[in-house]
Image (tube, rainbow, N blue to C red):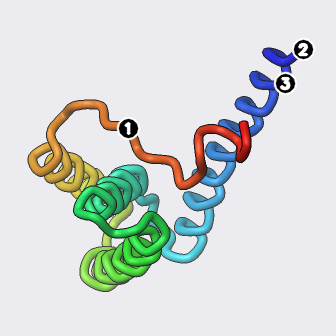
Amino acid sequence: MEQFLHQFFAGLATGGIYASIALALVMIYRATHHINFAQGEMATLSTYAALTLINIGLPYWIAFAVTVIASFVIGVAIERLIIRRMEKAPPMASIIVMLGLLILINSMVALIYGGNVTTFPSPFPSRPPGG
């Protein structure tokens, strides 16, 4: 029964992640009328930035807050400098620019952080208190 509950809640968590990604894609498309293929890469860059802040000694939640603010600023800059300029462009040009942004961010993350799998620390203790 314990394994079933674990799988059940892991499935709910994974489904929640996929639903969040789908919702974000739809919200960005409805707001800009462009599909942002680089959305996952932007999240990856933000995650590595948070990991870097944690590794240099910032507490988890401060690193989280700094990363959210920095990611917001980067997102606004991308919207103003790239997406907004694509407003009147043909749909194919917009798709090519978004794929280029995906490749650029992906390559930048691989260049800075390497291609190795990295674990992200949990903000919660691994054992319950008193256990």
**Residue at 15% in and 39% down:** 114
Can residue 55 be seen in the rendering of this structure?
A: yes
Q: Quadrant of the C terminus?
A: top right
Q: Amino acid at mark 2?
A: Met
> Residue 117 falls in which quadrant of the image?
top left
Q: Nearer the viewer, residue 123 or 117?
A: 123
Looking at the rendered structure, which numbered label has been put on residue 119? 1
Q: Secondary structure at mark 1?
A: loop
Looking at the rendered structure, which numbered label has been put on residue 1? 2
> Residue 130 falls in which quadrant of the image?
top right
Q: Residues within 10 Å of mark 1 (few under 14, many from 20)?
A: few
Query: In x, y percent, where is residue 33?
Result: 50, 70
Tag 3 residue: 5
Query: Which residue is situated farthest in the left direction here?
Result: 111
Query: In x, y percent, where is residue 77?
Result: 29, 82
Q: Are marks 1 and 2 in contact (CB under 8 Å)?
A: no
Query: In x, y percent, where is residue 21?
Result: 58, 52
Measure the alpha-carbon separation of dots 1 and 2.
28 Å
Q: Residues within 10 Å of mark 3 (few under 14, many from 20)?
A: few
Can residue 88 be seen in the rendering of this structure?
A: no
Measure the alpha-carbon separation of dots 3 and 2.
6 Å
Which is nearer the N-term, disc 1 or disc 2?
2
Q: Secondary structure at mark 2?
A: loop
In the picture shown, does residue 127 fall above or below 43?
A: above
Looking at the rendered structure, which numbered label has been put on residue 69? none
Q: Are marks 3 and 2 in contact (CB under 8 Å)?
A: yes
Q: Amino acid at mark 1?
A: Thr
